[in-house]
Each structure stands twice: as structure tokens, then as C-alpha cells.
Image: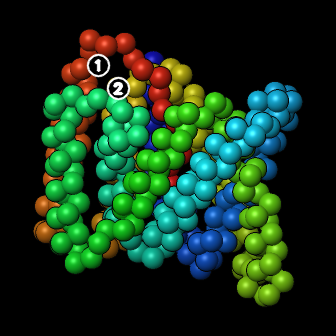
Amino acid sequence: MKKGVLYGIGAYLLWGIFPIYWKWLHTVPAIQVISHRIIWSFVLLALILFVTRQWKAFRSAAFSRRVVLIYLASAILLSINWLTYVWAVNAGFVIETSLGYFINPLISVLLGVIFLREKLRTWQWVPIGLAAIGVVYVAVSYGQFPWIALTLAFSFGIYGLVKKVAPLGSLYGLTLETGLLFLPAVGFLVYMQTIGQGAFLQGGFIKDMLMVGAGVVTTIPLLLFASAAQLIPLSTVGVLQYITPTMMFLLGVLAYHEPFNRSHLIGFCIVWLALILFAAENLWVRRAIPAEPIPELGEG
């Protein structure tokens, strides 16, 4: 249990400091950053499969029409989530990205009700209603629709919905997702290089290594999470997952000094209250219910 908790904390801490990494690449267009993230993630994941002699098993499990179509959908959703996240971080919206990941668990529950006909307990409706009020309040206090937060929450929520019916584990699944986007990403970067707008090999060694390193920083926390998921119960994961948006929020306020006044604080407090009620209700119920399979994540 202790080792699983440490793996989980490590994964969520790494996801939580992602804004720092993407800020180092703020001069590179977000779509180029994501293209590199896809390419180098696939290269690293494929290397892991080769080294561990799992490539043959991966091919036999992944290469069927149904599996490819499912993971093509999840790959598109994941790329939308990644692109929105990286763009938002470098455009100065770290606080709003944290809001997206705070409300994501509640969005996931709501999607389960709508599309999977899952039943909500009476007290689960209360935090969902509170979260909706909080989002509306934040929209009013910001003076604009919080599209970044909602795009992140819904894209990742729908991604989780697709993964609910996906047959592959986290390692094989992410390998197939990045593999399906690999050639389009390579083609896009080659085109940008030919028209003189490519960032790779143009901004110095450190920047190039940061772009290559995007694959490493994507893969390591996912592997840590996969290890944690096998060792700790879902209720513990439910508590740990709020480490990431909390760190994003603190970075946005304390490190990057993004605008955050009393009105914004009230809106966030409403969302935080919703999450506290949601987590407390789940912990109360799960004391008497065996742990369920743990969902796969892929933050930021």
C-alpha cells in the first residue's frame, strides 16, 4: 500500500508541475509542442515495448478494426485536451486549467449518467449542482465563458468515457493512441520545417531537448500511475487526484501571478465545496463496498 501511494503521489506531483515545463516552451506554437509530444511519446513507448518484448503481443491485441477505431476516437480527444492545455498554460490561463481538472471528476460522473445510464445516489447530485453553480459564478466573475476549463473537463471526461469500452491496458492504449497520430504529427512538423516556421533545430540545443523530452514527461507519470493503480484502492486515488489541479492553481496564483480576486475565490470555493462533498460521500459509501476497477488517467 505504501509503495502504491508513493507512486500515485509521484504521478500527480509530476502532472501538477507540467505548467512549468510547458512554460519553458512558450515561444514554440502549441500545436508544434503537441506534435513533438505525440512523436516522442510514441518513440519512447514503442522502445519500452521492444525492450520488454511486448511488441508482438501489442500488435496482436491492437491491430483490429474495432480497436483501432476506438483508439482513434480517444487519440483525437486526447490531442484536443493536450493542445488546449499547453496553449492555455502559455497564454496565461493556468488557474483556469486547474478549474478544468477540479471539475473533471464531476463531469465524468455526469457523462456516466447520460451515456452509460449509471445511477447517481441522491447525495451525489448535490456536488454536481454546486459545481455547476461554481462554474457559472466563475464565468460571471471572469466576465467571459470559461471555455478552457470546460474544454479540458469535457474532452478528458469523454476520453474517459471512450476508454471505458476500450479493451487495452494503459501502456498498450497510449502506444496505440500516439501511434495513430504519429504520421500526421511528423507530416505537420516536416511541412512547418519546409516553409521555415518549424521550431525544431532552430532555437538552440536546450529547447530542442525540451521538445524531445515532452515524450519522457508524458510517459513517466502515466507509468507511475499505472503502477499505483494496481496497488491502492479507488478511494485513495480519488483523494490523490486533486493534488494535480491544486498545484496548478497554486502555480497560477503564486508563481505566475495570474489575476485572481475575491470574486474568483468565491467561485473556486463553491467548486471546492462540491468536491469535498463528492469525495466525502464516496468515501462513506466505499467503506461498505469492495473497490472497483480504477479508471485510467492521462492528465495535461
Q: Is residue 51 visible?
A: no
Q: Locate residue 212: give its quadrant.
A: bottom right
Q: Is residue 225 left or right of residue 247?
A: right
Quadrant in the picture for the N terminus: top left
Kind of residue at badge 1: Arg
Is 208 situated left or right of 144 in this image? right
- Element type where label 1 sits in the image: helix
Find out whether the residues at labels 1 and 2 contact each other: C-beta distance under 8 Å.
yes
Comparing 77 with 95, the one in front is 77
Along the viewing direction, whichever of 218 and 127 lies nearer the viewer: 127
Relative height, residue 23 to residue 72 (above, below) = below
Residue 244 visible, this orientation: yes
Query: Relative to residue 204, is residue 164 drawn left or right?
Result: left
Residue drawn at x 68%, y 45% is 69
Task: Give percent across and percent down for residue 26.
Answer: 55, 75
What x and y, as percent, mark residue 133?
16, 56
Of residues 14 and 41, the one drawn nearer to the viewer in this rendering: 41
N-term-proximal mark, 1 vs 2: 2
Question: Residue at left 47%, top 23%?
Answer: 293
Q: Position of residue 59 (x, y in %)?
A: 82, 34
| Image mark for residue 286 | 1
Give the distance between the C-alpha atoms of the residues marked 1 and 2, in whole angstroms.
7 Å
Q: Which mark is residue 235?
A: 2
Question: Which residue occupies the extreme bottom position in the image?
Answer: 196
Q: Position of residue 90 (x, y in %)?
A: 49, 73
Mark in front: 1 vs 2: 1
Q: Residues within 10 Å of mark 2 (few under 14, many from 20)?
A: some
Q: Is residue 96 left or right of residue 60?
A: left
The disc placed on residue 209 is none
Which residue type does callout 2 highlight? Ser
